[in-house]
Amino acid sequence: MTTDYRTFLPDDATQLAELESRACAHGWSAAQYRDSVRCGHQFHGLFASDQLQGFAVTQSVLDEAELLNIVIDPRWQGQGLGKQLLRELRAALAASGARRLFLEVRAGNAVARSLYSSQGFVENGRRKNYYPCADGREDAILMETTP
């Protein structure tokens, strides 16, 4: 299995949105991915035999980076691919000069929070009622680590 870091292309938007819609209820739309391209965000794709298994979207400013989105195809979840993608993503960010990596995660997403904690992320804040959810709103947990 290899990880391919390549330029995020406008044509990828539909494929990314479709993959994310299989993985979560409140994913980004294809339009949001196209906007992400226009903003200059970086795309990190995890491929096996040219099949997209997961991806992450980051943005960098000076020596700080933010993980904007990370998705593993549900067919491949539970096999350590999230950890692999995070490790390789962090190495790429460190090589590009990033000294800190931030993210936010739904308070109710125990699986993601556990993954991030296992990879050295620590909680450093909370945004109340940040995300929409089935019964209203839920908090965002802010986390950070070094790449």
Image (cartoon, rainbow, N blue to C red):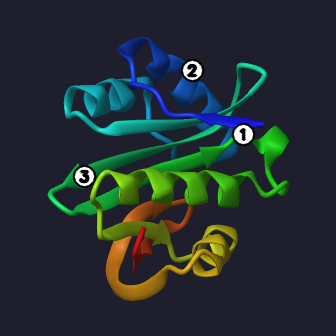
Q: What residue type is labelled 3?
A: Ser
Please report the residue visible at 35 percent of the width from the left and 69 percent of the height from the top. Answer: 102
Closer to the chain start, of discs 1 and 2, is 2
**Closer mark to the observer between disc 1 and disc 3:** 3
Is residue 67 visible to us here?
no
Q: Where is residue 100 in the image (x, y as percent from the top left)?
A: 31, 71
Q: Where is residue 110 in the image (x, y as percent from the top left)?
A: 66, 75
Q: Where is residue 136 in the image (x, y as percent from the top left)?
A: 46, 67
Q: Where is residue 121 in the image (x, y as percent from the top left)?
A: 50, 79
**Closer mark to the observer between disc 3 and disc 2:** 3
Q: Which of 114 and 87 is in front in this view?
A: 87
Closer to the chain start, of discs 3 and 2, is 2
Q: Do the residues labelled 1 and 2 touch (CB within 8 Å)?
A: no
Q: Is mark 3 on a helix, strand or loop?
A: strand
Q: What element carries label 1?
A: loop
Q: Are marks 1 and 3 in contact (CB under 8 Å)?
A: no
Inter-mark Cα distance, 1 to 2: 11 Å
Would you say 129 lies left or right of 122 here? left
Label 2 Cα crowd, 10 Å radius (few <14 / some 14-19 / many 20+): few
Quickly name the residue at label 2: 15
User: In the rendered image, which quarter is residue 86 located in?
Assistant: bottom right
Residue 44 position (above or below residue 145): above
Quickly name the residue at label 3: 60
Residue 121 position (above or below residue 82): below
Q: Which mark is residue 73?
A: 1
Closer to the chain start, of discs 1 and 3, is 3
